[in-house]
Amino acid sequence: MYRETVQHSTGVTEGTASERHATMLLTSAVRRGYAVEFTPAGGALITWTRHLFGPGEGSVVRAERSISLEPLMPVGALSPTTRIDLDLVAGDRQAQYAEKGGRRVITGLVWEIPAFTTARLRARGLVVEDGERLRLSLTARLGALAQQHRTRTTEPRGWYRPSAGDPYGAAGLNRPGGRAGMLRDGGSAATCSCGALSGWGGDRDEARRLTRDHRRAVAAAFIAEHLAPVPAPAVARCDCGGCAECMTG
């Protein structure tokens, strides 16, 4: 379950969303070209911009919209051992609960997760029953992906005094405030823990845009590949200006 917060034309609406409803929102967002980012807690943020007619003739106003999905039971930090257990469950369609020595365990085709670990995975809401088999919860999948893609930007070097061998030199750099003979470097590196992002921005804002675009691309690819669209029931067009069902406000 998720705490759902919708920012629309008439304000903010809060409620709860099931895993099925959250999946529908994510797949609909990618299909419409909206931006999606996952959170390490196992949630997601959907954002988009609407262009509305302004008060003046021919004027257009940009209206920011968003849907935030915060898990009622955050995933928490996933250790390497926990990731291995989750990979076992995710990769085996035979994963299910079984009883061993009077205690519940998770078993697969050729593997078994001990009772203590099984209880911990259940208590954290990382695995859920889907018919007769077990699968990872949506929060576990989103949280694991977000924790695999932790991005960072570096502090710009700022003002510095060039070395004697610097080809740019310091000649003519007659700046006030004690900065005479100094150069300024505002560049910032953008990296991701996955190793796929290693960029450079002219300033830190540009570097942050690189990391944001990377996280959004990862989320969109995951949704398109792994989250099958869930057909939503037909609803009449509401007049709230941007409810979670229509996502058009």
Image (spheres, grey):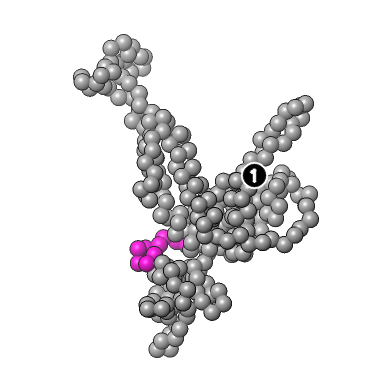
Please indicate, yes or no, whether residue 210 appears anywhere in the rendered image: yes
Q: Secondary structure at mark 1?
A: strand
Say left or right for 83 vs 56. Answer: left
Residue annotated with mark 1: 65
At horizontal 42% and vertical 51% (from top left) the residue drawn is: 149
Q: Is residue 229 magenta?
A: no
Question: Is 96 located above or below residue 172 in the figure?
Answer: below
Question: Is 182 located above or below residue 244 in the figure?
Answer: above
Residue 148 in the image: x percent, y percent?
Answer: 41, 54
The amino acid pointed to by label 1 is Arg
Image quadrant occupied by the N terminus: bottom right
Question: Is 59 located above or below residue 63 in the figure?
Answer: above
What are the residue bounds of the magenta stretch?
74-84
Q: Residue furthest left?
A: 164
Say left or right for 197 vs 132. Answer: left
Residue 224 in the image: x percent, y percent?
Answer: 54, 55
Q: Is residue 79 magenta?
A: yes
Residue 230 in the image: x percent, y percent?
Answer: 63, 62
